[in-house]
Each structure stands twice: as structure tokens, then as C-alpha cells.
Image (cartoon, grey):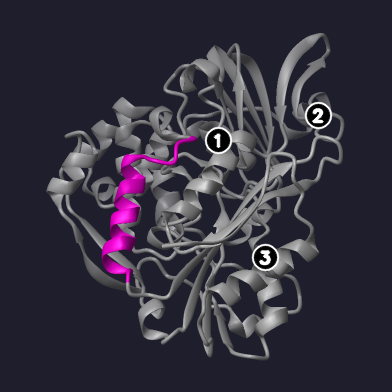
């Protein structure tokens, strides 16, 4: 295991030219003659990661030198259409290069994580076994190099996104996706988020270290944050290599740049969901996941969601969300115990837990025309009119952080996917 490149800092802004040189250095340090190359970037829901630009750079540099396949690490997300592919990866790369990961059907089962192992890492809360599997293309494509590309940022299921998660979930199978998410929910979101080590990370690392160790894997990890002066995204760090040290270095910088630790709880939080990025509550509930450690009891979370059109990215998950709703941990666990369909879809059950305020504060969704007030209320959220709330809390006028609107102090977040908001005492 080795770090190939590392560059960055809390105030750094890696340019496109510097990024290109870091990509070249990574490829050279892999020490491989590359005839067949597989790229595993995230999909458009991680638009800010710059993984799309990295993929484009690799195509520009090596597209005429070797065979390249690109498989966006969709996990359970819907396949990308041509519009999303162009938005994420630009217009130069032929669309024929992109492969779709089917998490239900295109998976090669490799082995299991035993129930004893799960019992150990969950502190005795769970004792099921987990099937380890990834898309069969990783093993059947005869690749000389597989590049796992993505952003390290606080994450509700695993603690910090990317690294082995990009493989075990991004191109993983239904069993590990479902059961790892439930493992995270059982461990408790508040004990996981913003931390490099967690029960779920232990599971993902075990799966990769045990069953993918012979694959020619190299990681390219970014750390991103919004520049306070320009309002634009800046690449604070780029790290590449073959082992956990690469991830740990990226995590250190992400903790420094992506965590906003507050002295006191927030009474009212307003979150904007970019319609190009957030079309479902499955993704949009990052507004809940990433803020609930900072919101006061009896507080309010107002979510402006103009692009909302569904609850789940997957038809079955959408059905389950509509049926059971975001109604808190006790109710969800009771429904899991009583309903086989939820026991078969523990990822959806975990999502229902993560998307609830546990009755501590109000969650008020303000959707566009794609979802009705009745639908919003049916899953356990409160509803408010988007036009009315956008006029009062205008995303064009608000700045990230504290604002005063009509004499009332509110905390505004322009993109919940970029960080984690919590109280300082949670990380003492």
C-alpha cells in the first residue's frame, strides 16, 4: 500500500492544470502497462466532486492509447441519462464507453462477512451474515488498472464517503448495500458521521481487503469545499494511491474543511436542493442527515426542493418509502420486525431512520410540481408552498450560514452534500 500523490490544504485551490499533472503522476506511479482501463467515478449526484473532470482528463490523455470503460458507481441510484452524463463528464467522451451498474442483477458474489464479524463490529446489535459482491465487470474485464475516483466528505452511513464505499456500495450488490446501511442505522448516525472509522467502514474494508485484493485498484480522492469569496467550489485536496493511508490523509483535510462545528443549536435551518442534483428524497434527505446534529429541539428544517419528483431512486425503494414513511426509529424497527418486505430491503429501512427527525424538530418540504402536498404529508413530512417560501427565503439573496430574514435569524445551506453541521460538543 502506498500514497502516489497528495496535494492540498484548507485554503488550497488546485487548478485544472495542477489536477492534470496529479492525474499523470498517479498513472505513472501505478507502474503498469495499461491496455485496458476501468474508471469507477460517482454519478451526477456527486457533481461537485470533480470526479467528472478527472474522468474527462483521463480520457483526453489516454483515450487513444488504451481501451477505456467507465462505470459510474451508481449504488442504488437511477441510471444516468445522456443529459446527466454530459453534465457530469462533459461532451467529449463517447457515450458508448459508459456502462450501467445494476446492483440487483450484474453482481459477482465473492464470499461473506460472517454473522460473528457483524456481531463484533455492531457491538452485539446485529448478527446476520453479509454477502460480499461487486459488479462482475471488475473481474471479467481483464483490466490492467481500475481507478476508483471520488470525493471524501462526511457521510451518514459510513462516516466519511468514498474509498472502499465506492466499491462495496457504488458497484456493490443488494445484500451488502442493504445490510451495511442498516448496520449504520443500528450503530447510530450521530456516532458515525464525520469519522473515518466506523462499523460500516470496517465492513467495507474487510470486503475489499479480503475479496478484491488481487484487483489492480488505485484510488483517486478529492476534498472539495465552497470558496467563501467566490461562492464557487474549490478543490482543496487530491490524494491517490493504493491503501488506507490515502483515505486517511483525505479524511484529515475533509474534517478540517467540510465540518462546521457550532457553539449552540440552530432554531431554523433553510436548505436549498439544486434541481439538477436532487430529484428524490432518497438524495434530498441529505438536508436532514447532514443537519440534524445541529438543529435544536422544537426547531425547524425548511427544505426548498424545486426538482423533487419522487421519493426513492429505485421503484421498489420508492414504493417502500411511500408505504412506511419517515416515522422514526421505533416505528421503523417495528415495521421491519412485522414485514418481510422491509427485512428484505434493509437499506430502505435504514433510509427511513436516517430521514426522520425522531420527533425532535419539524421537517418542512417545499417541492416543485413533481410531488404534491398530499404525497409529502403521507410520508411523515410537513408541507409548505415552494413559491411562497422561496420568496421569503430567496436562495439568490441568502449567503451560507447565518442570515436575518424579517427580523428572524436563520441558518442557510446552499448544498447539504458539501458538509456536516454539528455541535462542537459532539466532537469533543
Residue range corresponding to the magenta coloring: 194-213
Which of discs 1 and 3 lies nearer the camera? The answer is 3
349 displayed left or right of 91: left
Q: Quadrant of residue 401?
A: top right
Q: Earlier in the sequence, mark 2 or mark 3?
A: 3
327 displayed left or right of 218: left
Task: Decide: is 11 above or below 211.
Answer: above
Task: Decide: is 92 above or below 241.
Answer: below
- Image coordinates for residue 218, horizontal then vertical, percent: 49, 68
Count of marks placed on residues: 3
Q: What's the magenta bit mostly, secondary-structure-wise?
A: helix
Tell me whether the residue at label 2 lies in contact with that at label 1, contact meaning CB atoms closer than 8 angstroms. Answer: no
Q: Earlier in the sequence, mark 2 or mark 1?
A: 1
Which of discs 2 and 1 lies nearer the camera? The answer is 2
Q: Secondary structure at mark 3?
A: helix
Q: Earlier in the sequence, mark 1 or mark 3?
A: 3
Residue behind mark 2: 399
Other residues around mark 1 within 10 Å, as few (<14) / some (14–19) / many (≥20):
many
Tell me whether the residue at label 2 lies in contact with that at label 3, contact meaning CB atoms closer than 8 angstroms. Answer: no
Indicate which disc residue 376 carries: 1
Residue behind mark 3: 22
Q: Quadrant of residue 304?
A: top right
Q: Nearer the viewer, residue 168 or 307?
A: 168
Q: CA distance from mark 1 to mark 3?
A: 45 Å
Q: CA distance from mark 2 to mark 3?
A: 33 Å
Amino acid at each position: 500500500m502506498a500514497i502516489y500523490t497528495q496535494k492540498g490544504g484548507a485554503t488550497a485551490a488546485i487548478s485544472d492544470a495542477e489536477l492534470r499533472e496529479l492525474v499523470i503522476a498517479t498513472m505513472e506511479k501505478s507502474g503498469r502497462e495499461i491496455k485496458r482501463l476501468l474508471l469507477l467515478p460517482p454519478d451526477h449526484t456527486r457533481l461537485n466532486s470533480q470526479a467528472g473532470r478527472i474522468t474527462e482528463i483521463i480520457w483526453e490523455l489516454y483515450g487513444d492509447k488504451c481501451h477505456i470503460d467507465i462505470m459510474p458507481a451508481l449504488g442504488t441510484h437511477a441510471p444516468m441519462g445522456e443529459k446527466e452524463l454530459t453534465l457530469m463528464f462533459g461532451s467529449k467522451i463517447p457515450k458508448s464507453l459508459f456502462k450501467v451498474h445494476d446492483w440487483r442483477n450484474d453482481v459477482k458474489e465473492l464470499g461473506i462477512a460472517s454473522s460473528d464479524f457483524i456481531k463484533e463490529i455492531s457491538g452485539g446489535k446485529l448478527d446476520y451474515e453479509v454477502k460480499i459482491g461487486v459488479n462482475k465487470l471488475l473481474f471479467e474485464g481483464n483490466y490492467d488498472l481500475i481507478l476508483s475516483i471520488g470525493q471524501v466528505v462526511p457521510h451518514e452511513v459510513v462516516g466519511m464517503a468514498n474509498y472502499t464505499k465506492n466499491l462495496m456500495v457504488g458497484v456493490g450488490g443488494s445484500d451488502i448495500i442493504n445490510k451495511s446501511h442498516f448496520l449504520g442505522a443500528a450503530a447510530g448516525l450521530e456516532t458515525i458521521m464525520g469519522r473515518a472509522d466506523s462499523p460500516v467502514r470496517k465492513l467495507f474494508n474487510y470486503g475489499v481487503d479480503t475479496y478484491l485484493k488481487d484487483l489492480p485498484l488505485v484510488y483517486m480522492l478529492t476534498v472539495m469545499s465552497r470558496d467563501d469569496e467566490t461562492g464557487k467550489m474549490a478543490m482543496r485536496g487530491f490524494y491517490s494511491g493504493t491503501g488506507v493511508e490515502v483515505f486517511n490523509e483525505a479524511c484529515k483535510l475533509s474534517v478540517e474543511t467540510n465540518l462546521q462545528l457550532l457553539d449552540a443549536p440552530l432554531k431554523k435551518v433553510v436548505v436549498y436542493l439544486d434541481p439538477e442534483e436532487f430529484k428524490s428524497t432518497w438524495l434530498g434527505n441529505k438536508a436532514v442527515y447532514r443537519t440534524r446534529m445541529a438543529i435544536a429541539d422544537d426547531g425547524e428544517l425548511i427544505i426548498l426542493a424545486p426538482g423533487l419528483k419522487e421519493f426513492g431512486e429505485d421503484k421498489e425503494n420508492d414504493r417502500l418509502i411511500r408505504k412506511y414513511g419517515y416515522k422514526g426509529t421505533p416505528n421503523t424497527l417495528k415495521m421491519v420486525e412485522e414485514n418481510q418486505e422491509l427485512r428484505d430491503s434493509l437499506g430502505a429501512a435504514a433510509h427511513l431512520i436516517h430521514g426522520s427527525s425522531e420527533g425532535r424538530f419539524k421537517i418542512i418540504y417545499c417541492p416543485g410540481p413533481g410531488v404534491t402536498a398530499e404525497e409529502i404529508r403521507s410520508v411523515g413530512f410537513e408541507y409548505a408552498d415552494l413559491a411562497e417560501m422561496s420568496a421569503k427565503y430567496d436562495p439568490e439573496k441568502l449567503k451560507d450560514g447565518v442570515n436575518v430574514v424579517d427580523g428572524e435569524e436563520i441558518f442557510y445551506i446552499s448544498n447539504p452534500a458539501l458538509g456536516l453541521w454539528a455541535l462542537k460538543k459532539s466532537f469533543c
